[in-house]
């Protein structure tokens, strides 16, 4: 595959993986939690390095998963103790992220684990960091990592689709019929954590938030069915990656930044032009009602 093809494939995998996970965050009104976990997993990554003295993916996944779950736990703990949800997210997010930055500065400053790389990422370097199995180059490491996370997320969604759906729309009903709501909550947080850490090398922690939220928010405006929303969100994620790559090539700017920007542009277009919830259609509907009302008078 060409250099261009690997970058587009990596961006598309980020779009699909983040788009699927983001749908449930949108429905549960937990979009800002994605921002929090996308930053606090830095602590998990540096912690995993300090414990294992290795940058292998499995250690990074384990560290990110633990800290992602701890982030969700601490936020839930503060919120249930009377602290407002946004304040709880702000306190936990900034505290754990700051601790990660301090640890990177103290113990991991000389290795390929700097704050700028974790936050901003660099998808242009992805094709050069390849994985070798039995002496055979099998392609970029990021593609394999994102592919593995996508399979895990798809398996979880397929196995627990009904439970995730009911918990997202009506958690009280889910609790009443015996669905383990807290388990599903932390399962979703685990998906979010591994999705975030897998995207670090391609779009970075800050820009992955755009890919987690914007495609899901766009899909939410286009359909009322969860299954269709998941497909649309994944499709919008891929479109953001492809359009973003060619726009970045045209204007010679950051590829990951343009992919995230394209996700925002697609959301704005959907916000205005959605057939059912778009501002333009609402304006036509109100105008039609006004004409009918005037005709009756």
Image: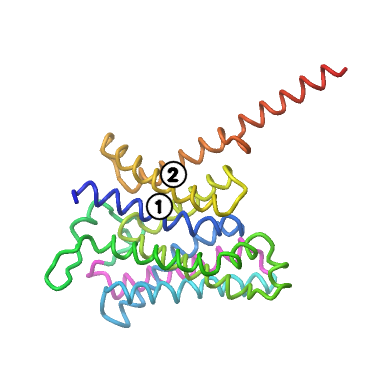
Instruction: Rate crowding at label 2 as few (under 14), some (14 to 19) or many (20 or more) other CA atoms within 10 Å.
Output: many
As drawn, the label of residue 295 is none
Decide which of 240, 164 is in the foreground and name it: 164
Residue 90 magenta-highlighted: yes
Residue drawn where x is 44% and y is 63% of the image: 39
Prevailing secondary structure of the magenta residues: helix
Residue 25 vs 291, above or below: the answer is: below
User: What range of the chain is rendered magenta?
Assistant: 83-112
The image quarter containing residue 255 is top left
As drawn, the label of residue 15 is 1
Residue drawn where x is 42% and y is 48% of the image: 237
Residue drawn where x is 65% and y is 69% of the image: 79
CB atoms of marks 1 and 2 within 8 Å: yes
Residue 155 vs 236, above or below: the answer is: below
Left or right relative to 172: residue 208: left
Local secondary structure at mark 1: helix
Identify the image quadrant of the C terminus. Answer: top right
Local secondary structure at mark 2: helix
């Amino acid at each position: 595959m060409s250099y261009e093809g690997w970058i587009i494939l990596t961006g598309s995998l980020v779009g699909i993986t983040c788009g699927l996970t983001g749908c449930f965050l949108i429905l549960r009104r937990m979009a800002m939690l994605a921002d929090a976990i996308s930053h606090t997993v830095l602590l998990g990554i540096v912690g995993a390095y300090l414990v294992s003295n290795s940058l292998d993916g499995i250690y990074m996944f384990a560290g990110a998963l633990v800290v992602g779950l701890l982030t969700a736990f601490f936020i839930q703990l503060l919120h249930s103790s009377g602290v407002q949800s946004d304040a709880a997210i702000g306190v936990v997010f900034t505290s754990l992220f700051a601790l990660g930055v301090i640890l990177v500065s103290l113990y991991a400053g000389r290795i390929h684990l700097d704050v700028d790389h974790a936050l901003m990422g660099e998808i242009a370097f992805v094709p050069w960091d390849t994985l070798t199995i039995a002496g055979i180059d099998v392609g970029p490491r990021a593609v394999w990592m994102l592919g593995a996370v996508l399979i895990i997320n798809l398996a979880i969604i397929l196995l627990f689709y009904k439970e995730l759906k009911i918990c997202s729309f009506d958690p009280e009903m889910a609790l009443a019929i015996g669905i383990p709501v807290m388990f599903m909550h932390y399962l979703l947080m685990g998906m979010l954590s591994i999705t975030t850490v897998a995207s670090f090398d391609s779009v970075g922690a800050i820009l992955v938030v755009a890919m987690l939220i914007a495609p899901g928010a766009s899909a939410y405006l286009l359909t009322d069915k969860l299954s269709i929303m998941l497909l649309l969100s994944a499709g919008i994620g891929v479109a953001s990656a492809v359009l973003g790559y060619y726009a970045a090539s045209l204007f010679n700017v950051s590829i990951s930044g343009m992919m995230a920007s394209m996700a925002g542009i697609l959301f704005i277009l959907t916000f205005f032009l959605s057939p059912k919830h778009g501002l333009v259609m609402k304006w036509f509907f109100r105008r039609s009602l006004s004409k009918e009302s005037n005709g009756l008078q």
